Image: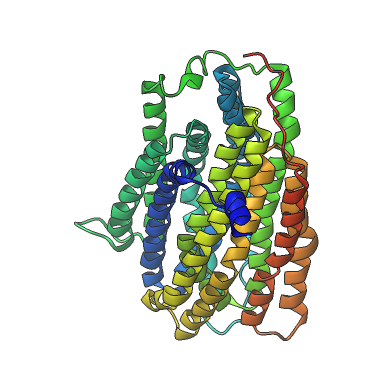
Amino acid sequence: MFEKFRRAFIGDKAFYRRVLLLAVPMILQNAVTSFVSFLDNIMVGQIGTEQMSGVAIVNQLMFVFNIAIFGGVSGAGIFGTQFFGKGDYNGQKYAFRFKMYAVLIISAIASGLFAFMGEPLISLYLNDNGTVGDIDLALKYGQEYLLIMLGSLVPFAVCQAYVSTIRETGQTLVPMIASAAAVALNLILDFILIFGFGGIPALGVKGAAIATVAARILECIIVIVWTHINKDKNPYIKGAFRGFGIPKNICVNILKKGTPLMLNEFLWAAGMAVIVQCYAVRGLEVVAALNISSTITNLFNIVYIQLGASISVIVGQSLGAGQLEESKSLAKKMIFFSVVCCAAVSAVMASVGGFFPSIYNTEESIRELAGVFILISACAMPLCAFSHCAYFTLRSGGRTVITFLFDSVYTWVLLIPYAYILAEFTSFSIEKVFFFVQFAEIFKVIIGVFMLKSGVWLQNIVTGYDE
């Protein structure tokens, strides 16, 4: 029995070498980014609760934009990965071109929305039901931060179009280096601009925003310059900007597959923001505690998030090469590996996570609440790891309508009403509400198991295109 289990779920040395060579640079890149975000968060948190809360709310809005960008590149990315697996670099070039159109359109829409609707969007998260903090001050700081952060939208979007295509080829080192350079700049500028240094005045939240914009621009420049200098490693970039057209059959199919995926990413991110807003009705201290806990949780979540993303590359390339049975075997092994890794990471997070809130210069009640949120998130992490891997496995085969049902419909039809009812119409403490919502993930896991076993995701979507 063990031998059967081993063959199904445990790979050989070559398998783990391949996975780790792809995933480790991605994990390190996001670890550096998340760690600097953590330090950035602490620096802003030293100024005061209102400043930290205002920035946290804007970052929640930016999270929705970031995920919308990921959605914009993901639909074309499914095709790009399979085109690369097939050896069709012209097809990959057209997928890249589609990404550029998508991210620029999303950036334009987001810029207009944040510029003209920033105040009401931030106000959705501000409620005076709590006992600490000044919501008017939090709104003021949030608006200041958001206005400057508008300058980061286009550089971030263009960078993701390039980075996602680079990763389709299995190259993850350069995006990691670019990200490391960007976060180093961000950290240095944070220290100088938030607190003031060498005659430069302390700019507070404005300084934090300026630092982030500068870092996004630097990362974008590094990635673009490297890609165009190294055309031999990135053959899809040859002639990518000599024209603007995309063959009709490729464009139509990307739209068919990509639109549900883009909508899914946006609606899922918006759903997460709505759930945070449900929690926020309990007061500003809840917003502050969620900001602290989510910053810590994101630092630990990168392992399963990037292992899940690796599935879309490895399994996608296998599907593009027409190796359906091999794809099924790879998916099983990668999901098992991800969940096991995540269980170990969650144990570490549960053990040490409660220490981090004490670093913040805020009320003791906020620190205690953040510690509880961190512990609950750690316990639920293995469930999130499985559902995340299931999502990327389904997506790798282009089953974007199914992923839309699995992710967004589940979130909006079941999870959001559930969170809203618990927060608004029960006398449960916010800790209990958070626990019940986090562990609702188990239902998504059950759905994911049935979808994966059905094999509905096993398909090659680039067969029939001319190279």
Residue 210 position in % (x across, y down) = 39, 50
Q: How many marks?
A: 0
Residue at x 40% of width, y 45% of height: 25
**Quadrant position of residue 101:** top right
Residue 285 versus residue 262: which sits nearer the camera?
262
Residue 209 versus residue 13: which sits nearer the camera?
13
With 238 as the anchor, is 390 left or right in this view? right
Residue at x 70% of width, y 51% of height: 267
Q: Is residue 25 above or below residue 32?
A: above
Residue 175 position in % (x across, y down) = 41, 39
Considering every residue shown, the one lying at the far right of the view is 413
Residue at x 37% of width, y 56% of height: 207
With 441 as the anchor, is 347 left or right in this view? left
Considering every residue shown, the one lying at the far left of the view is 198
Q: Is residue 25 above or below residue 122?
A: above
Which part of the image, by quadrant, shows the C terminus?
A: top right
Residue at x 20% of width, y 57% of height: 199
With 240 as the anchor, is 352 left or right in this view? left
**Quadrant position of residue 388:** bottom right
Q: Is residue 97 visible?
A: no
Q: Is residue 64 above or below residue 83?
A: below
Q: Is residue 127 above or below residue 199?
A: below
Residue 298 versus residue 244: which sits nearer the camera?
298
Residue 105 position in % (x across, y down) = 62, 34
Residue 358 position in % (x across, y down) = 39, 79
* Applied colour scheme: rainbow
Q: Is residue 462 visible?
A: yes
Which part of the image, by quadrant, shows the N terminus?
A: bottom right
